[in-house]
Image (spheres, rainbow, N blue to C red):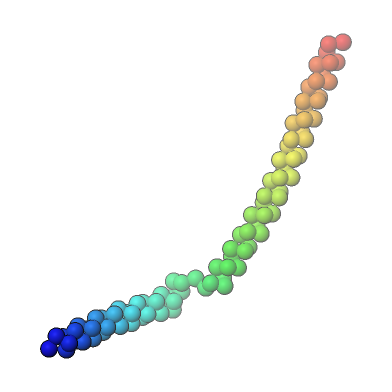
């Protein structure tokens, strides 16, 4: 009798797990069909585009920072020249 009860318990657990998996699959399909899931290729493409945009923005920022540093240096040089001219 104990062996049969164990088999019945295993069968009930298996049926329960099967029904949960079936419900999860149905929910997944509904979500996919409604467009609630992103296409992996589109996500990858969007990510790569964002990386390219970030690299371009970082490059532009580095160029702007270099130009700003140059301008700051030139400004300091002009102030020094102005002070030197006023001293004469």
Give the residue drawn at x 81%, y 25%. 77
Choose top left, top right, bottom left or bottom right for residue 84. top right
Residue 19 visible? The answer is no
Give the residue drawn at x 71%, y 50%. 59
Choose between 8 and 55: the one closer to the eye.
8
Residue closest to the far right: 88
* 86 left or right, relative to 25: right
Query: Which quadrant of the figure contains the N terminus?
Result: bottom left
Residue 76 is situated, as x and y percent measured from the top left of the image, at 77, 25
* 14 left or right, relative to 3: right
- On screen, 41 above or below 15? above
Query: Which quadrant of the figure contains the C terminus?
Result: top right
Choose top left, top right, bottom left or bottom right for residue 51. bottom right
Residue 75 visible? The answer is yes
Residue 79 is situated, as x and y percent measured from the top left of the image, at 78, 22
* 27 left or right, relative to 75: left
- On screen, 38 above or below 86? below
- On screen, 36 above or below 71? below
Count up the numbered dots: 0
Residue 50 is situated, as x and y percent measured from the top left of the image, at 61, 59
Residue closest to the far top: 88
Give the residue drawn at x 83%, y 20%. 81
* 28 left or right, relative to 74: left
Residue 65 is situated, as x and y percent measured from the top left of the image, at 71, 40
Give the residue drawn at x 41%, y 79%. 29
- On screen, 82 above or below 5? above
């Amino acid at each position: 009798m104990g062996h049969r009860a164990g088999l019945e318990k295993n069968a009930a657990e298996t049926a329960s797990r099967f029904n949960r998996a079936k419900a999860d699959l149905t929910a997944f399909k509904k979500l996919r069909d409604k467009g609630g899931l992103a296409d992996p290729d589109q996500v990858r493409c969007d990510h790569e585009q964002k990386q390219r945009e970030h690299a371009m923005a970082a490059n532009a920022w580095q160029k702007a920072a270099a130009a700003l540093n140059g301008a700051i240096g030139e400004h300091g040089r002009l102030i020094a020249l102005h002070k030197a001219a006023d001293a004469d």
